[in-house]
Amino acid sequence: MQNKITKEDMRSLAPAIVRVGVSVVFIWFGYQQLIDASSWTVLVPSWVTSFSGTNAVSFIYLNGIFEVVFGICLLLGLFTKTVGFLLALHMLHITYLVGYNDVGVRDFGLSLSTIAVFLHGADSWCVDKYLTKVNLPSARHL
């Protein structure tokens, strides 16, 4: 006898699918920045380099590392709420900088998706859920 997949089973997958989809976007863009940072420097506002004291290429490398590391954490579901919050702020800032155009509208959708991941927190496929089940002290705040 086959087990039927219920609507509730499918509904419970939705947060994980959004989390994985958003994380892949961050990992891909971060990786692209790391393999060809100079192509991304045109997107760095001049105030960022003057304020931070770093050059645009260094800033792109730092941003790429941030997006890859936090994207992997989100993919795994590790510190999901914290990472979701930081990536949502990051994405909202990018959306603001890009402005109202086709790319900005896409980025706005990604921002809202990342906010949804933050608001939902750990789904049933997250490492966070496993850590909570084994009752590790560091997992209680997740």
Image: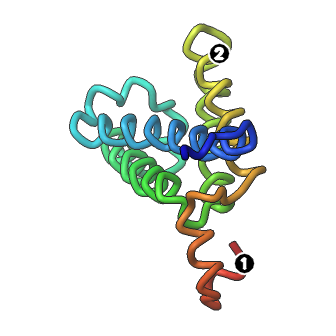
- What separation in Å lies between label 2 and label 1 (alpha carbons)? 34 Å
Specify the farthest residue to the bottom. Answer: 137
Looking at the rendered structure, the secondary structure element under dot 1 is: loop
Pointer 1 residue: 141
Q: Which of 110 and 58 is in front in this view?
A: 110
Up the image or down, 138 lies above or below 142; here it is: below
Residue drawn at x 73%, y 42% is 116
Pointer 2 residue: 105
Kindly identify the amino acid type of the residue bearing the numbered disc 1. Answer: His
Residue drawn at x 46%, y 35% is 25
Name the quarter where the C terminus is drawn.
bottom right
**In the rendered picture of this protein, how many numbered marks are placed on residues?**
2
Where is residue 66 drawn, in percent x and y?
A: 44, 53
Looking at the rendered structure, the secondary structure element under dot 2 is: helix
Residue drawn at x 51%, y 43% is 20
Residue 82 appearing in the image: yes
Residue drawn at x 43%, y 39% is 24
Q: Is residue 86 left or right of residue 39?
A: right
Specify the farthest residue to the front. Answer: 1
Kindly identify the amino acid type of the residue bearing the numbered disc 2. Answer: Val
Q: Earlier in the sequence, mark 2 or mark 1?
A: 2
Up the image or down, 2 lies above or below 127; here it is: above
Specify the farthest residue to the top. Answer: 102
Q: Which of 64 and 15 is in front in this view?
A: 15
Residue 89 appearing in the image: no
Q: Which of marks 2 and 1 is in front?
A: 1
Find residue 28 and report its image quarter. top left
Q: Nearer the viewer, residue 55 or 8?
A: 8
Find residue 137 and report its image quarter. bottom right
Q: Residues within 10 Å of mark 1 (few under 14, many from 20)?
A: few
Where is residue 42 drawn, in percent x and y?
A: 39, 24
